[in-house]
Amino acid sequence: MCGIIGIVGVEPVSGRLIETLRRLEYRGYDSAGVAGVVGGHVERRRAKGKIRELEAALAAQPLDATVGIGHTRWATHGAPSAGNAHPQTAGRVSVAHNGIIENFAALKAELQGRGRVFQSDTDTEVVAHLIDEGLAAGQEPMAALKAALDRLTGAYALAVLVEGHDDLVMGARRGSPLVVGYGEGEMFIGSDALAVGPFTKRIAYLEEGDHVAIDHGEARIFDAAGARVERPIQLVAASAALVEKGNYRHFMEKEIHDQPDACQHTLASYVDPIAGRAEAPGGFDFQAVDRLQILACGTAYYAGLIGKYLIESLAGLPVDVEVASEFRYREAAVSPDTLAVAISQSGETADTLAALRWCKERGLATAAVVNAHESSMAREAGVLWPTNAGPEICVLSTKAFTAQVSVLTALAIAAARQRGRIDEAEERRRVAILLEAPRLLAQALAVEDQVRAVSHLVARARDVLYLGRGAMFPLAMEGALKLKEVSYIHAEGYAAGEMKHGPIALIDEATPVVVVAPSDALFEKTLSNISEVMAREGPVILITDEAGAARAPPEAKLVVAPACDPLIAPLVFAVPLQLLAYQVGVFKGADVDQPRNLAKSVTVE
Ligand code: G6P
């Protein structure tokens, strides 16, 4: 999703704006722009495409400013183009915006009726016009901003420059996050802590409805009612070092390799290795609820589905899992003793956040499994169940996914004990198994060469089928999603037993079938499905363990992952699937970390 930076600096700002936009690239974008105050005037440079295009525009026409704003745009209203790139300007006002102004068409018609002329197809331009109208009517900038905000329906984080107010950047948030950074004689606003992290560690998170004015010395923050408020300044840990690629070629590769650490750091918040006990941080009582409603999008949704298999089988607690964009609009029937659990890497995904709020408004208890601990979901949910995967930069989720599955596995054990389904000895045994996951994740990384040997088979396919049973079924869907995202090859994940009810019609010698099957209680049944595929000349790539490999048909191409208890198989077997997608993406020369059309955090509907 779009990224925003605003700087009231004492030193030239262009280089820092570009540097920040690079750090925000991971959110996904298709154009970028900056604006700065030059000799009392606001000037813009904008470009379609990558940041290097914007850099070229700045090299051709430098922007010698110490105060400025910058933006990476992921197109919603209006095609990606230099003209639709932000900042959008009207009169004396330039605006960078993340989100969607839902009533922009009505506002635009109204403004045009008053003689305002629009230069772009964006929803954002109405914000610039509204503020400029206020200024023209004699309002001070913050009053004009507030009046404009009161007219907007939708979601936004804004950064605003006003010509004639050379040391001022204004900001506002509703629905999309915005932070304020406190420097030495310099102030910043940005989309997240990573945006301002290299400039200052002192950060305040704005609340919903807040708007802010920063100058050289201070931030004046006002709430939705217009009252002056203070937001606590925190020291953030998000150091720039955490977002470097190190020796890896892509963030995706680095983050796949981060998984043993991410899993270990995450489990540290849930598992006491000495007592052999699993507990939700803060000590949630799973006896107090009779159902879980998991809400999530994308990869987090598949983590939720794996959680359903684990929690229902271990703890006997019914779990519903639904994509948040459906749940929020379909008048779901929820019982009062349901715990709503949002799962999200970013904690800002618009549909998941709205679904969480919907549940909260109906009086349900809420929890959020979230990687960005200061995000909206983290702050709004009744309980925060953190994943400690560290910043995930690649648009495709890998380490956040296994961290989410780690949390759900630990919660399944805690819930099973509390609900009397397992005794303490069995809990200790399960916890010991779970604590093997970081080591086995590290061992699973060693399948890299085996995966490389089969990746060419997948890379030349037009369609690929992924099959699994039990918790390997949602994992197969996640594997298929990874492949589509990174390689643009069509892939579907299916329950292996369901294959004969449709997908089998697709199988021929050009359609590889990736089967995820550790040698568990269902292995025999999956072997029959493999035979069905092979009888139709479908090439099979079997991801299994050593015992499974020993029983595999000789024609199957094998990837042998470490043997593990079924409890942690969804973690261990995620790795070969991620590596397969990654290697196919690299083989095809794809933009691995920022695939076309995708955004890291989708803060619009
Ligand atoms: C986008 C990303 C996916 C992610 C999904 C949910 O579609 O590209 O990788 O799984 O959003 O994001 P969240 O931050 O809520 O986990």
Image (spheres, rainbow, N blue to C red):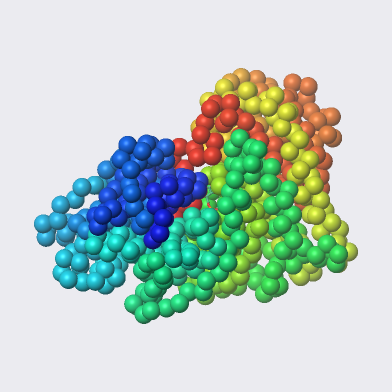
Quadrant hosting residue 587: top right
- Along the horizontal axis of the image, is 402 left or right of 420? left
Q: Quadrant of the C terminus?
A: bottom left
Query: x%, y% of residue 57?
Result: 34, 38
- Residue 260 visible? The answer is yes
For the residue pair 251 and 469, the one nearer the viewer reads as 251
Q: Position of residue 176 (x, y in %)?
A: 43, 60
Measuring from the top left, give residue 252's x and y in whole percent.
60, 40
Q: Vertical placement of 363 versus 467: above or below?
A: below
In the displayed structure, does residue 93 sit left or right of residue 212? left
Q: Going 35% across and 41% down the picture, which residue do you hit?
A: 58
Question: Is residue 86 something that shows in the picture?
Answer: no
* Total count of labels: 0
Could you tell whether 439 is left or right of 121 in the image?
right
At 38% from the left edge and 79% from the top edge, which residue is drawn? 228
Q: Looking at the rendering, which quadrant does residue 114 occupy?
A: bottom left
Residue 285 higher or lower than 468, as above or below: below
Name, please, the residue furthest toward the bottom.
227
Residue extending farthest right: 425
Q: Residue at x 47, y 47 (%)?
A: 19
The structure residue drawn at horizontal position 70% and vertical position 30%, both measured from the top left corner, is: 451
The x, y position of residue 36, in whole percent, is 32, 53
49 relative to 282 in the view: left or right: left
Q: Nearest the camera: 421 or 6?
A: 6
Q: Is residue 223 above or below residue 330?
A: below
Which residue occupies the foreground of this view, 207 or 580?
A: 207
